[in-house]
Amino acid sequence: MKDANANAEGKKAAGIAAAARVSDGQRVGLGTGSTAAFAIAELGRRAREEGLRIECVATSLQSRNLALDAGLTVLSLDRVAELDISIDGADEIDPALNLIKGGGAAHTLEKLVHSMSKRFIVVADPSKLSETLGTKFRVPVETLPFAAAYVTKALGELGAQSVDLRSGSGKDGPVITDNGNIVLDARFAITDPAWLEAQLKSIAGVVESGVFARVKPRPGDCLIGEGAAVRIL
Ligand code: 5RP
């Protein structure tokens, strides 16, 4: 489980640095989570104070509301096929910039939005860096509710060491995503992220996994906030 309140200074520095890479007239994908929230706030500040004109799409109800509150224009995702740039957090980042995402259960729309984007900027703090994906974070698997038992069995056959239905806080029972599905958190020893991503996607009943090995930032586009400084990977 992630700690949304940890390393706020570094997350803010990374979010501000990412927002500085957005140019006037661009279409921008907005990620979800506490680090992406700093980027959204900074884009709102730039729109108000610098006259930055952008159009955004959101990856969750949370990022949509943050963007609207910040005064940004938010387009309906179903009307957009291409973006200039998108910004998002991550739960685990390996040296090849493969990611695990979905700590906020928003990874399905996040993968869609980053797939349609020419440039994908990742913002994070150093606690997200990892030599091998899966050692710090389990893989979130958004699953159709009726497929819970089948997908749990299929994940086990794929090598998952454990599979847990994600439960909510502030609500009894499972987390229900913005898409009306459940999330299974699967612990894997990951040797080949791209292979695992493809295998997970091929299981009937799986909507999307939080492994981002095909859609990932290019070198130079992963911003790690360490205190007030930003390290570029
Ligand atoms: C949401 C995500 C988030 O980007 C990820 O969980 C990182 O969040 P935070 O910036 O709060 O640590 O993938 O589904």
Image: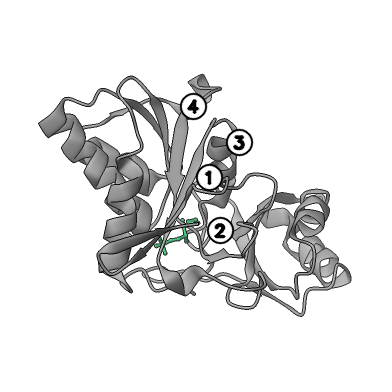
Amino acid type shown at disc 2: Lys
Can you give x and y, in whole percent of width and height, for residue 118 in the image? 54, 30
Label 4: state its secondary structure: loop
Can you give x and y, in whole percent of width and height, for residue 115 in the image? 60, 36
Residue identified by numbered label 3: 115
Q: Residues within 10 Å of mark 3 (few under 14, many from 20)?
A: some
Where on the image, by quarter, is ligand 1?
bottom left
Residue identified by numbered label 2: 101
Disc 2 CB within 8 Å of nearest ligand 1 atom: yes
Q: Residues within 10 Å of mark 1 (few under 14, many from 20)?
A: many
Residue 44 in view, yes or no: yes
Judging depth in this view, the residue of 216 and 178 nearest the camera is 216
Task: Judge left or right: residue 22 versus residue 111.
Answer: left
Badges 4 and 2: C-beta atoms under 8 Å apart?
Answer: no
Q: Mark 2 or mark 3: which comes first in sequence?
A: 2
Disc 1 CB within 8 Å of nearest ligand 1 atom: yes
Label 3: state its secondary structure: helix
Coloring scheme used: one colour
Residue identified by numbered label 4: 83
Badges 1 and 2: C-beta atoms under 8 Å apart?
Answer: yes
Judging depth in this view, the residue of 226 and 127 nearest the camera is 226
Q: Which of the two marks, 3 or 1, is nearer to us in this view?
A: 3
Label 1: state its secondary structure: helix
Label 2: state its secondary structure: loop
Can you give x and y, in whole percent of width and height, for residue 124 in the image? 42, 61
Badges 4 and 3: C-beta atoms under 8 Å apart?
Answer: no
Q: Residues within 10 Å of mark 2 (few under 14, many from 20)?
A: many
Residue identified by numbered label 1: 110
Task: Judge left or right: residue 205 versus residue 36.
Answer: right
